[in-house]
Amino acid sequence: MTDNLTKVENFNYGIEKIFDKAQDFLPINGTDYVELYVGNAKQAAHYYKTAFGFQSLAYAGLETGLKDRTSYVLVQDKIRLVLTTPLTENNTISEHIKKHGDGVKVIALWVDDAKKAFEETTKRGAKAYFEPIVEKDSFGEVVRAGIKTYGETVHIFVERKNYTGVFLPGYESWKSEYNPSSTGLKYIDHMVGNVELGNMNKWAAFYADVMGFANLVTFDDKDISTEYTALMSKVMSNGNGRIKFPINEPAMGKKKSQIEEYLDFYGGPGCQHIAVATDDIVFTIAEMRKRGVEFLHVPGTYYDTVLDRVGIISEDLQILKSQGIMVDRDDEGYLLQIFTKPVEDRPTLFFEIIQRKGAKSFGKGNFQALFESIEAEQARRGTL
């Protein structure tokens, strides 16, 4: 009990430390977009529209003057997904897909001054992905710059205060007669990176020293483990708390953990999952299930004792059980969450759907059930 209280106190201290900062050398307004390199962007766009409720926003490709790639931009409330496919064999995007399969390449961050963001991070040790560039069209200009992070994942700083176009210069509006209704997704809550054993502290330090993030909470192998596997995680957050990046590494266990499985099939470190927020998780999950999204199975026995742990909630527990939605509480409130199965054939990238009702934590009380569900899937794949 003392250990658990200490972790809660440390979490709260981390929150206070962040929000008490008077000056933030890297102010970030939010997530601008997330770009995935995929084998077939047109088909992937259809999947995310149909299954997740995204809408058509913008397009770039041969018709707009691009010769090496095609990109489709999807939107749902504050979330923008960019799906990019190479058009030629000898292409860095082709090499990325050959090694990793479909996966996140760019986590773009919306800033007021991209040049300053680049200068502040590179002088603190970040490796440049590309130096600041100004992109213009008839709608104004966008300034972008990029830095490298774990594996081949990059951050691109996007300054768009002088731009009124649909997305970025070089993109045109994507008009489509097929736009399924929204599933209620609102914004990106957090994005999780998987790194090799021994590298979690290195990348946590990167976010602290290079980007000015603070460590909200640390989970060790006693917090996140089963009889067979374990992992460790540090949650890093920027100054205003809008950007949160948990960094995971495997821990020693009897069998191969989900992190090791990811690293094997992804071919190195990368983004494990994207957590997207909703204001009505019951509606969102019911809609997504109807549209074919597959979720991890939560053992029915989980619900036998969950209310003893989390106390009174507004939702009907039987409805949550029917949808496989888990619940956890911290001293600020509670949250509801559920995890999809991987959204491609490699057991790598998946999504978390989360609804926060005051809670600022990450569902520690659900780790055991989540791990057991993931291990069951690993056993089916023969990779445990």
Image (cartoon, helix red, strand yellow):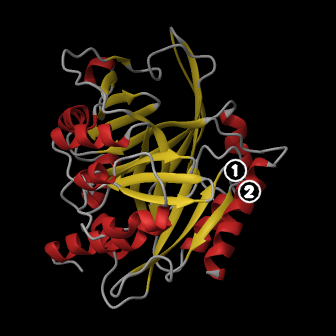
Residue 317 in sight from this viewpoint: yes
The percent coordinates of residue 132 (x first, y second) are 62, 35
Q: Return the mark for residue 124.
A: 2
Residue at the (33%, 91%) spot, across then down: 254
**Quadrant in the picture for the N terminus:** bottom right
Q: Which residue is mark 1?
A: 121
Q: Is residue 307 above or below residue 230?
A: above
How many labels were placed on the picture? Answer: 2
Q: Amino acid at mark 1?
A: Thr
Residue at the (48%, 62%) spot, across then down: 310
Q: Is residue 255 above or below residue 50?
A: below
Give the CA separation, mark 1 to mark 2.
Answer: 5 Å
User: Observer-nearest residue: 181 or 166?
Assistant: 181
- SS for tag 1? helix
The percent coordinates of residue 244 (x first, y second) are 57, 52
Q: Which residue occupies the extreme top position in the image?
A: 138
In-image side of 141 versus 193 (left or right): right
- SS for tag 2? loop
Residue 26, quarter of picture? top right
